[in-house]
Amino acid sequence: MINISDEEYFIGHKACAGCGGSIAVRLALKVLGARSLVAVPAGCISAVSFIYPQMAFNVNSIISTFAGTASMLSGMAAGAKALGLSDYHVVGFAGDGGTVDIGIQALSGAIDRHEKIIYICYDNEGYMNTGVQQSGATPKSAKTTTTPVGSNMRGSATGKKNMFEIVAANGIDYAATASIGYPEDYLNKVSRAASVNGTSYIHVLSPCPTGWGFNERECIQLAREAVDSGLWALAEYSNGEFALSRKPTAFKPVKEYLARQSRFKHLEATEISAAEAERDAYWERIRKNWKVKGDGHVKI
Amino acid sequence: MSGANNKRFISGNEAVAEGVRLARPHVISAYPITPQTTVVERLADMVADGSLKTEFMYVESEHSALSALIGASAMGARTFTATSSQGLLYMAECLHYASGGRFPIVMMNANRSVALPWNILGDQRDSLSLLDSGWIQAYAADAQEALDFTIQAFAIAEHSDVLTPFMVNLDGFVLTHTYEAVSLPSQEDVDKFLPKFVTANKLDLDSPKSLGFTAGAGDNTEFKYLQHKAMQSAPGVINETELRFNSIFKRERRGLLESYLADDAEYIIITLGSVAGTVKTVVDALRAQGIKAGLVRLRYIRPFPAKEIAQICENAKAIGVLEKDISFGYEGTVYTNVKSALFDAGIIKPSHNFVAGLGGRDIPREDIFKIFNILSTRGDREEKVHFVGLKQK
Amino acid sequence: MPRPEIQKYKQHADVSDYPKGTVAPAGYLVTDSSGWRSERPALDINLCKGCFRCYLFCPDASIEKLGKKVGIDLRFCKGCGICSVECKFGAIKMVKENI
């Protein structure tokens, strides 16, 4: 089990009760420590942690422009280097909207430059801070306030952008997918990201009770079930190689995971089967092409 | 060699690059846009040959160029970037971010027309449309002033009473790409002039801070008021900086504005940027004919030299504001600012607004003669806003 | 110090009390979130095995390590109940808050 700090670097924020994103941030900072230089764009985490004078980040932190988190992080890294500082981590915590949509251009540039930054995307599958609107990471069929359910629309018509493979194709030095439902795996990946001499990206699934429609106490259970049902794969990427973090033999039924969330309560049997088929096709592809960590052949 | 001024035949853009090199910024971000490109190209040459030691960032957009500098400035680094028109507007939210965050970033802007229609030539619509973004805005008349403004910008912006980002404007092509003999200060003298950048407004590993936060209805006004006060303190800091600069580098120019034969002038043109050079020659020609013409060149638009303008225009018969922009449906922005200054001083004079040079259209001497003619013959006519040289049958 | 104290804060009376720039001390807390909850976690210390899962999963850092067991810091607890679900030993039950 990885050693993490007992210090609380993220406390006193105004996030919803049971907020998955806040768990992702709190845990990552216990790995990265007191000498973290944090940037957070517009979104849930910044909106709830920087309300003058209440500052819930107990480390150096700054709100970044919405589209510019990765460029702000790049600038912080350049400034720290130019000023001769040592022993620090430059880390960003951006939501899915701020990453896969408005922030993708700056992220691509930072990866291209191999900036020495850690970019953590806490994915709650929508623009939650502004009231649960659809983002590029909203899964297919999810009800959001801009993709409601009616005779002409059945929730989101598009699926999740595959950010993990996008950053890999961009040439990232290290990337990983994670879930707060598997905290040890997440913490290990944060630790690995911290040691990379280049850009690292972690995409951590962070369920949102308010936006997904479930009882807040089930947050961690849902984060686990997303992985156990095969809808969210835990993996890593480095140097052209993908590696699954675990080798699931059987998946829990997708239907059970979806039934716990009111954003999917309108789903018909055909739509659920379609989701399962998509899951199966995805796993067929990645099982064929990706190794499994721990089987002795993986360099990551 | 201390006090020695090396003369080099360089363009306005190259002069800015030399000024940046001498100011030793820690971080520079670069995204190309005509007609700024030779600034960042020249800076890249300097990095390549080792004459400029800096963290040179090749960002993927102008919004990132300024976001990156905000991050670097938040670490306590001295920072510089350059842009123009579309790029300036792409980073527009970052301008407010930088000024509200009180980050003393220095940015050169190559004044260029803003689409649509597309036009890469010089006018002033880009920077003048962002007067309210909280940046100090200076407008260079020639390459020497471009270099001098660049060096002074860091000193003024970083001053603890100011802590406001600074935009140095050069007319696209007519100043960015034209060549003149420029005195290059020595590194030693610039090091003497420019103090190290020290600020409490930064992330600090020894004493962690939170920056760039939210201020609600109960606090927001106070933050904005302090920004306003800082801009109001800028003239004093500019004055003291210029006096120090001029004594070390043997220069003469100072003040938020420069006037030429305006004290006893009956007809005054107020303008900004390099066109002032042309206006000056017309003023000389008219004076030779016995017409009391005068010129006021605004070196700074923010802070705005309201009192100085009022003082100079007090006894004029008519005032014309010549600018390369228009606030559609009304009048030019500089004209609005000038009239406000005159009104506050109780000076009501016949005045006209001359919108010229849009999309890089040349402003020949003949047009300036026509402008003075309008001032001296048409008095306080209803038609105040003139699109100079408009094709009309 | 592992967790920040709540500061006594008086609203600024004059504009000159404000900082030059949007800069403030990190980890400076002036209010708590205890008023948010309608339920609170009740810990049976005898059932606590010191696995620290509750500590790990709390979104609001409201569970602290006290030696080999845990304690609850109610200042920022919003009563989400994650701790009660994730404890495998039934050591935490949610009870109605006194409103």
Image (spheres, grey):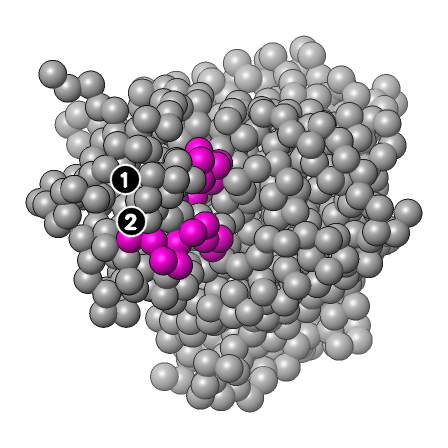
Locate residue B174 relative to residue A292 in the image: left or right. Answer: left
The structure residue drawn at horizontal position 49% and vertical position 58%, both measured from the top left corner, is: B256
Residues packed near mark 1 inside 10 Å, few (<14), some (14 to 19) or many (20 plus): many
Q: Nearer the viewer, residue A36 or B233?
A: B233
Above or below, B146 against C3 in this view is: above
Q: Which residues are magenta?
A: B257-281
Q: Are marks 2 and 1 on the same chain?
A: yes
Q: Nearer the viewer, residue B320 or B191?
A: B320
Label 1 belongs to which residue? B372
Q: Amino acid at mark 1?
A: Phe
The structure residue drawn at horizontal position 52% and vertical position 74%, both measured from the top left corner, is: A53
The numbered mark, 2 or 1, whose residue comes first in the sequence reads 2
Q: Quadrant of residue C59?
A: bottom right
Q: Can residue B344 be seen in this snapshot? A: yes
Locate residue A102 relative to residue A180 in the image: left or right. Answer: left
Residue B189 is situated, as x and y percent measured from the top left of the image, at 82, 53
Above or below, A44 against B9 in this view is: below
The structure residue drawn at horizontal position 75% and vertical position 52%, both measured from the top left corner, is: B249
Above or below, A118 against B253 in this view is: above
Q: Can residue B33 be seen in this snapshot? A: no
Label 2 belongs to which residue? B267
